Amino acid sequence: QVQLVESGGGLVQAGGSLRLSCAASGSISSISTVGWHRQAPGKQRELVASITSAGLGNYADSVKGRFTISRDNAKNTLYLQMNSLKPEDTAVYYCKAMKWGRAYWGQGTQVTVSS
């Protein structure tokens, strides 16, 4: 089992920044790709960014150039630096980890961007 706990969400004005963190615990060995997804009210959950164990990042077009994903394997923590935030970035952000083909999710953290 893998447990994921997100933090760092909050309310920010448009153009501002936030950094999300996701702390992993439990059986964290062999975790491969980790990433961030988000779900806005009335919309499907979507991929924001992911990063492989080798450090290769992948981003949704809507966040390229504004968001940066990183992972600190020594601290078992995943980060999402979000800059130049827009109201359309408002959503619940979830951390996801893949291990042996199984997906593990955190409980989510709310990000609200005011205009």
Image (tube, helix red, strand yellow):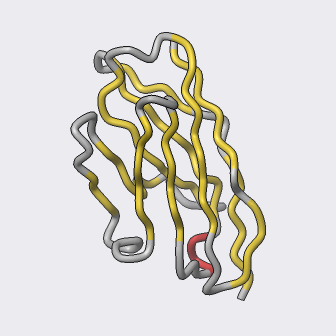
Q: Quadrant of residue 91?
A: bottom right
Q: Residue at x 57, y 40 (%)?
A: 22
Q: Which of 23 and 109 is in front in this view?
A: 23
Say whether residue 96 is left or right of residue 3: left
Residue 99 is left or right of residue 78, and the answer is: left
Q: Which of 94 and 40 is in front in this view?
A: 94
Taking the spot 54% from the left edge, 82% from the top edge, the residue there is 84
Q: In this view, does 10 lie above or below 72?
A: below
Number of marks in the rendered image: 0
**Quadrant, the C terminus:** bottom right
In this rendering, is residue 93 above or below 114? above
Q: What residue is at 57 percent from the left and 77 percent from the top?
A: 88
Q: Residue drawn 29% across and 20% down?
A: 101
Residue 24 image-quadrant placement: top right
Residue 54 spot, x, y in % from top left: 22, 38
Residue 28 at what x, y percent from top left? 45, 17
Q: Along the horizontal axis of the image, is 90 left or right of 83? A: right
Q: Nearer the viewer, residue 73 or 115?
A: 73
Percent from the top left, x then y, of residue 99? 35, 20
In the current view of this chain or complex, which residue is farthest to the right? 11
